[in-house]
Amino acid sequence: MARMAGRRTLFAAPVLLVVTFGVFAVAAASPFDPVKAYAGTAGLTASQENLDQLRVNLGVDQPLVERWWNWLTSAVTGDLGDSGVMRQPVTDVITERLGWSVLLAVTAFLVAILLGTSLGVLAARRQGGWLDRLVSSAAYTLEAAPAFWLGLLAMWFFALRLGVLPAGGLTDTDSEVVTFGQVATHLVLPAAVLGVSQLPWFFLYVRQGVADALEEDPVRGARARGLDECTVLLGHALRSGMLPTLTLVGSRVPELITGALLVETVFSWPGIAAATVQAATSVDFPLLAALTVLATAAVLAGNLLSDLLYGLADPRVGFDG
């Protein structure tokens, strides 16, 4: 296990280098001017001399390779630079927002896994039954539904029409402090929407895996020995049927990140979504590069986690092969 994790870590280094250079290259080719974005309305009346000086101060007057290399060498020492659009260090921007994004993503992922697994097992037990047909139809429909559309629909129904849940934000509008109860209440809708958007893949994988496992000789033998249905399903069929599903943990991370950005925007969740959008539209090189590296590292970590879980669940799979 340690050897595989070490190899993946070494492989991640050149990947991150290429990704960061690609970010700077794409940003350099962007039609957006970071100087005008930084200056805002003041840039409309500023002289060309002042704009040129501001360009020097922001470091965007340097060639592409030099700008990327300066950022990279500083990032290795822990200095991610300053965000022009946020007017604060990039480290502070990420620190203030990352925790809320992680809370939303982890909660949604748990909802998708637990609910998708439960429904998948129940549907596989009675293939062709009313529950199987109903949930399968809903899963195929949800696969094509954008996360932001689900978010707007949920906001309209639960917040505006029924009034049982808040429409967005982290706390109530009249509250000056962040409390656990308010955060939990405001988390329900965005986490549920993001989790439901990821649920179809877990449901379909578990359903197919458990259905195939129920036809295998070991499971049939367990039933022949008189074991109760719950033990057969959870102790035998689910364990065997979950193996292909473990690969989804890593493959769904990019979709989870994309969906989280959309859901955070819809529900005004104070995560990294707003920072990402502003960094992209303002060509904020330091912040954009740091957020892209963070997302890439999350995808690589998700893929590694999938392989580790698969190896732990199936001893026949070698970690060092």
Image (cartoon, helix red, strand yellow):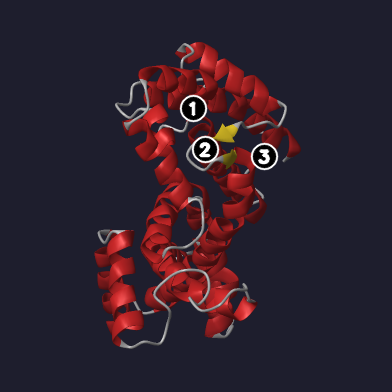
Discs 1, 2 touching: Cβ within 8 Å: yes
Q: Is residue 28 visible?
A: yes
- Residue behind mark 3: 319
Name the amino acid type tagged 1.
Answer: Val
Report the mark closest to the observer, 1 or 3: 1
Tell me the kind of residue under disc 2: Thr
Above or below residue 40? Residue 211 is below
Q: Looking at the picture, which amino acid does disc 3 mark?
A: Phe
Quadrant in the rendering for residue 321: top right
In the picture provided, is 37 more to the left or to the right than 300? Answer: left
Q: Secondary structure at mark 3?
A: loop
Indicate the quadrant where residue 82 lies: top right
Q: Is residue 239 above or below residue 135?
A: above
Q: Could you say whether the residue bearing mark 1 is in a helix, strand or loop?
A: helix
| Quadrant of the frame with the N terminus | top right
Q: Which residue is mark 2?
A: 296
Q: Residue at x 35, y 27 (%)?
A: 33
User: Pointer 2: residues within 10 angstroms few (<14), some, or many (20+)?
Assistant: some
Q: Residues within 10 Å of mark 3 (few under 14, many from 20)?
A: some
What is the C-alpha distance between the residues marked 2 and 3? Answer: 23 Å
| Label ID, residue 19 | 1
| Residue 106 screen position, x and y as percent | 56, 61
Q: Nearer the viewer, residue 271 or 31?
A: 31
Where is residue 192 shown, x and y percent of the image?
44, 71
For marks 1 and 3, the one nearer the N-term is 1
